[in-house]
């Protein structure tokens, strides 16, 4: 505990230059006497820390002395700082990430630290959505992270779906995957490798027994192949549209396009595209949303459904106008 406090004290001085005993005491939540003893310990260890008296006094490090970050160049620093938003979305994770960034910046040379501060001033992350999205309950995430980091078996109470009842199982944690705002635990079970959504873990207990890890297990390889298999099991409904260029561009943003050709007979550059949907209802919604900018070419059932509903819409509005 004291070693952690000494490191925090050292990094605070590197970041802020000079701090009073009262400021250090408040930040570290210790007494002034403890701050004084810790400073003596740092000095005895060879760290050039000095006490300056007077109204503007306090504790200060020798300005020429600084811990270094080995092997961190400008491009690596930029990538690290820009990658921080990946963990934001959970309050505890965001706080831990911010503390880690603060420690890293404190250990940087002055010139690199100025660049890092400049980058942070040019990056803002808004984790809220324009549309209301379901929230993720990540209350179990810190405990699951601890089990993964320590390679310890984990007892979890897990609910497979909203309507299903939770069940208890013992798993061997192998890794965590963050996808969007959701987190997933990849674990070894008696039935093989499984993926558990952290927000569906209703309770967890870390056991003293070490987790059993399959030889040559690669988390990235497993997740990529597992995700591909999952996508193959999803329902699929293909529709063929003839769309205006701007409508085609909008559809590409939302749905995967299998095949696309430019119709030579159309002077306006309309695009014939085969689009993947999860269901006919979804394809029907998109076709109506783009109205006259998209024609449904296939399947016939979808085209008939869109035509019938368009006729009903026209009839309803005609009666309103009358």
Image (spheres, rainbow, N blue to C red):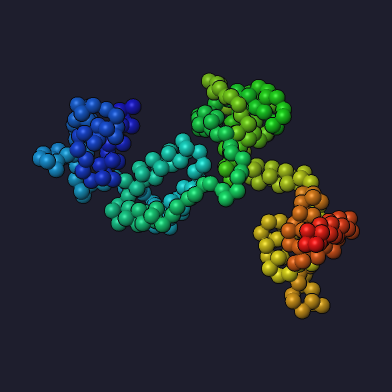
Tell me: residue 130, above or below residue 321: above
Counting from the top left corner in percent of width and height, residue 10 is at: 27, 39
- Residue located at (58% from left, 37% from top): 136
The quadrant of the picture occupied by the C terminus is bottom right
Could you tell me if residue 59 is visible in this image? yes
Residue 43 relative to residue 222: left or right = left
Percent x, y for residue 210?
55, 24
Using the rendered view, name the quadrant where residue 246 is placed.
bottom right
Q: Is residue 317 visible?
A: no
Work out which residue is located at the far front of the displayed protein and give it: 322
Tell me the residue at 71%/65% (across/down). Answer: 248
Q: Quadrant of residue 119?
A: bottom left
Residue 257 is left or right of residue 45, and the answer is right
Please state the horizontal and vertical placement of residue 245, each as a whole percent of the image: 71, 70
State the residue in front, 261 or 14.
261
- Work out which residue is located at the far left of the displayed protein and give it: 54
Instruction: Determine the residue positioned at 73% across, 46% down.
Output: 231
Disc tally is 0
């Amino acid at each position: 505990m004291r070693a952690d406090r000494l490191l925090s004290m050292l990094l605070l001085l590197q970041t802020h230059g000079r701090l009073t005993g009262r400021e250090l005491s408040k930040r570290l939540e210790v007494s002034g006497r403890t701050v004084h003893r810790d400073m003596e310990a740092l000095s005895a260890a060879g760290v050039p820390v000095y006490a300056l008296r007077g109204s503007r006094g306090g504790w200060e490090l020798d300005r020429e002395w600084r811990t270094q970050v080995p092997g961190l160049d400008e491009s690596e620093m930029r990538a690290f700082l820009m990658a921080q938003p990946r963990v934001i979305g959970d309050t505890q994770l965001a706080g831990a990430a911010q503390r880690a960034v603060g420690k890293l910046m404190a250990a940087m040379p002055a010139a690199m630290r100025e660049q890092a501060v400049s980058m942070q001033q040019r990056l803002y992350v808004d984790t809220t959505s324009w549309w209301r999205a379901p929230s993720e309950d990540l209350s179990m995430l810190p405990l699951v992270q601890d089990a993964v980091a320590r390679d310890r078996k984990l007892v979890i109470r897990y609910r497979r779906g909203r309507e299903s009842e939770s069940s208890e199982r013992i798993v061997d944690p192998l890794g965590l995957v963050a996808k969007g705002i959701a987190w997933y635990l990849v674990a070894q079970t008696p039935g093989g490798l499984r993926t558990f959504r952290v927000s569906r873990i209703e309770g967890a207990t870390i056991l003293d027994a070490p987790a059993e890890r399959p030889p040559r297990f690669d988390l990235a390889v497993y997740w990529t192949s597992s995700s591909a298999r999952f996508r193959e099991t999803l329902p699929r409904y293909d529709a063929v549209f003839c769309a205006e260029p701007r409508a085609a561009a909008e559809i590409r943003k939302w749905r995967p396009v299998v095949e696309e050709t430019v119709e030579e007979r159309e002077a306006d550059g309309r695009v014939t595209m085969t689009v993947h949907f999860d269901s006919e209802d979804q394809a029907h919604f998109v076709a109506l949303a783009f109205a006259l900018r998209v024609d449904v070419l296939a399947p016939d059932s979808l085209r008939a459904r869109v035509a019938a509903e368009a006729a009903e819409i026209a009839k309803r509005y005609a009666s309103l106008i009358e």
